[in-house]
Image (cartoon, coloured by chain):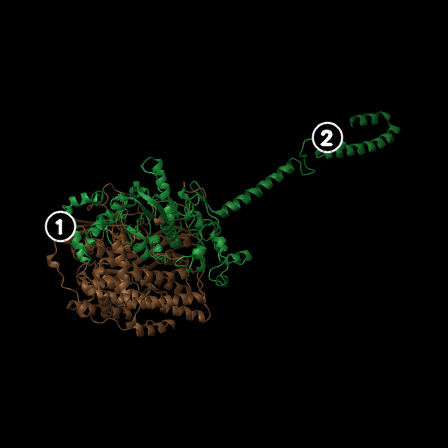
Amino acid sequence: MTTKEICSTSFDELLEQRGIKRRDFLKLCAGIAATLGLSQTMIPRIAHALEESVIGATSGNLKPALWLELSSCSGCTESFAQSDSPNIATVILELLSLNYSEALCAGAGWSLELAKEQTIDAGGYLLIIEGSLMEGWDGNALVIAEEKGTEIVEHAASHADAIICVGSCSVDGGWQSAYPNPSGAIGIPLYLNNAKAAGRLDYDLPPIVNLPHCPANPEHVAAVVVEYLLLKRFPELTNENKPAMMFSQTIHDNCPRRGHFENGEFVYEFGTEAEVKRFCLYPVGCKGPETKSNCPVVRWNRRNGWCIDSGAPCIGCATTNPRRPGFNWVDMNAPFRSHLRNVAIGDFNIPPAFIAYGVAGALVLGLVIHGFGMKASGRLKGGAPYERERKWDTNHPERAIGPAKAAEKAAEKAAAAKDKDDAKSKDKNKSKKGDSSKKGGGK
Amino acid sequence: MSKVVATNVQPELEENNDGLEQDGAAGAAVAATEVPIEPISAEIKPQEPQGSKLPTPSGQALIDPVSRIEGHLRIDMEVKDGVVADAWVSATLFRGMELILEGREPTDAAYITQRICGVCPVSHAHAASMAAEDALDIKIPNGARLIRNIIEGSQFLHSHILWFYNLAGLDYVNPLNALKANPKKALQVALDAGTSISDFGAVQKRLEAFAENGQLSIFSGHWFDGKDEAYKLTPELDLICTTHYLEALEMQAVASEISSIVGGKMPHVMSAIPGGSTWMPTAQNLDDILFRAIRLRDWIKATMIPDTYAIAPFYLDVAGYGAGPGRYIAWGVFNREDLDPANRYLPAGVWGFDESLAAPDEDAITEETVRAFYKDSGEPVNPRQGITDPEFPDDAYSRDGRYSWSKAPRYNGKPYEAGGLSRLLVAYNSGNDFVTEKIDDLLDYLSSAAGTKLGPEALNSTLGRTAARNIETWYIAECLIEWIGELIEAISEGGIETFAKATKSSGEGTGMWEAPRGALYHHEKVTGNKIDAYQIIIPSTWNASPRSADGARGPMEEALVGVPVADLEKPIHALRTVHSFDPCIACAVHITEPATGKTFSTVTSPWGVK
């Protein structure tokens, strides 16, 4: 029997399939109550718990939640487990009924899939998604319980109250979608939007909150979940569906080393005195100025550290573009130790230095050619008039501007030459009368 | 709501702890301490097992997905008369890390490879850095060595604590059964077992409130009621261990705090790069990490180790199955000043119950793809020459065909097991005093509980793998304090160097290191500070490997054969056996080289990848 077969049935069908009558089932519940040492009054409640409880929509105070791990490293679950207010024990016992989490759930295999299935059927749950989807090999790059990751998400999103995409992989594919994206990684929001546009989804997409970072910052996840439980709403979002409170300012804006940046005090080499003094890491590649997140404020691991505190320049792991998988943080920010990236055009991969020398070289070459051209055209001596002489200027030299000045000069020169000529011609006239009249006419 | 978690009173072990705290503060050598375990008291003696009454079904048992691991794993088993006759372990995710690394810088690789696994990122950062250092002839300064040991050690503690209590723990502990416990009696049981006591009553009340609410949360679809009747702890011990489950959630975070102070954040630390570390400790940092390390060590000694001893007698049957191939590899972890792999705190070595200890040989490693989703290259190849081309077959996941994204690494053509047990057995056979003493103590204890003399072969089992990892946790906790002491001493004597620059930009190098889950191998070819080729072999690729061409099962498949199954739908013993390997499947699935003749260049276009 495959997991899928088991999971696709309703609870009653499932009992029937296994040859269990409903009465036997209630008996079983009585047995469990006895095993647990609970009073008889608890029996219906336990029956309800086993039958419906995973659903949680009809009873219980906990908000049902599914934590899907898709193509992930489990780092976001790990990260969330570091949260301290609330801590993970409080979350799973007193805030959320975490009915499906591959990392934490006691069950495994079909019974875990069943819990997920029932939760989806009941609806009204929070869908938390870690990791990206894989479209490679027609979705076969990611298969869980004989179901492709893409199908799992399309199904799980159907009755969700909201989707929280934790971590950069989930938001836009993350590092897995970095070139050459060998497995066809894609972020959840883009995938679902594409599926909706292609008419594969027969439901309206629930609201999506994106929480980038690699891994997701536990403070961010806890804040969004708890705010949703307490205030029954999500925080204000940016146009990329990221909470505006968290992702509106750059890391540079709030960096404790910002003062050293203003003073021009920098770390140029790791392991030096400058690092002991906690100078600014910009020259060693810090992506703080272009990465938007409040991690200098919330920090990491119960506020005990954050990247720049450990002398490591920001690598911009919160850089995302949920609409464009190619804009993942690795492709946007690597090489992490430099500020300029290679530019790829087609199959050519051009380093920034090449482009800089290329542009500078082309400029110099252009100027040299221009110079030769100038020389060849004889414009170097006095240059060419950059504006054509206008008739009006010529006719009104006393009121002329621009080229008219030249005309003026020409006129003055002509006048001076005339005077000279006149003087000469007077002299010449004295000797040769016929010649002077010919010259004067030529002018 | 969670006040209970914070209170952790340990009156019985106070004097023990005091002495050790001073040791730690002074940065003294690992203190060889007596085992704080009393003989099992009458009250917690396990009941007789009722194995004979259990059903013995035949048929297919399938666990898909396996929960409480990292990544996605599918276990397919053929059960015959209540015992697993054959098993197929499938990794069901492909990501292609190596392809993404090509054309990038070695420093970038240290950051990107970490993202392969959220549980052991530090090990990947270190192995990637070591590969780059080997390729570019960098020798890291002593300060960097200590910093790496500290951050690696705290990651091991984090991983092992989380694994024992929060991942594997629910295979042995039934928190719902703790509702039946008498807190007063639990207190006495805890004192008798020498484990730490806490406000058990408050924890029970918290569980009651949880149960009354009626929603099962993470216990949805649990296997506590399987026909195997495999949960054997008394309600009192269940209550104690549930309390410690909650404490462990706290302590794994404390371990990560050390990683975070040294490495910026955890998971995915930032300060580990080729050449050393970017972190320059301040005085404030030093006391922050020292006292967290002491707190962890004290908790492990007072809680984790006694818990292991207290529940082991109930689960002696678990020592009777789960035997792997009996051959072990460890590349070694935690450098001493000479950076010699054979001299590491947990040394490098290859050992088997019928093989003597040998130094690892990179040339002996081969990988096969005959049963994996890759075009088969025909014969086993060394990862340095590996040619692999992913290909998803039509009959995927069939028992006779290809069934995994994981390749099949072999050493000298044979499957080897990697992990905590491998490291400890290599250390045991290389004469590590602490490990030898603790392993002997454990074997003595198990022998007295079982009533027969047990040798080291008993460790080749699900129980052995589990217990060995906990002993390792203790050892690393003691070492961690030692390293922090050394660092403090070095700083007080005039400062440390933490970073060495590369003097060349091309070369080829290997980093052989250990992740918490076992032997980790990174190899890279660098030209002009750009990576031409990158290869990774991950511990779980060794353990969860599919069959090789000769039909030899992977270690996890081997261990599953012979595991009792009374309930085809909830094969709990099989789940225990899988968990004992602490599999990390997201790591294990990757490919080692692009298709023949195909090259890739990094595209970091501002217009995105087209």
Q: Is residue B163 above or below residue A439?
A: below
Give the class, few, some or many, for how many residues have Cα within 10 Å of label 1's Cα (few <14, many ≥20).
Answer: some
Determine whether, in the image, residue A133 is placed left or right of residue B493. left
The three-letter amino acid code for the residue at tag 2 is Asp
Which chain gets the green colouring? A
Q: Residue B122 at x, y = what percent? A: 36, 58
Instruction: Say which quadrant the C terminus of chain A sits in.
Output: top right
- Report the disc number at residue B398: none
Q: Residue B107 at x, y = what percent? A: 42, 54
**Considering depth in this image, is A243 or B139 the residue closer to the camera?**
A243
- Can you identify the residue that label 2 sits on? A393
Q: Given the image, what chain letter belongs to the residue carrying mark 2?
A: A
The answer to which image quadrant residue B448 occupies is: bottom left
Q: Secondary structure at mark 1?
A: loop
Give the class, few, some or many, for how many residues have Cα within 10 Å of label 2's Cα (few <14, many ≥20).
Answer: some
**Considering depth in this image, is B590 or A38 the residue closer to the camera?**
A38
Q: Secondary structure at mark 2?
A: helix
- Can you identify the residue that label 1 sits on? B58
Residue visible at 30% across and 54% down in the picture: A92
- Colour of chain B as rendered: brown
Q: Nearer the viewer, mark 2 or mark 1?
A: 1
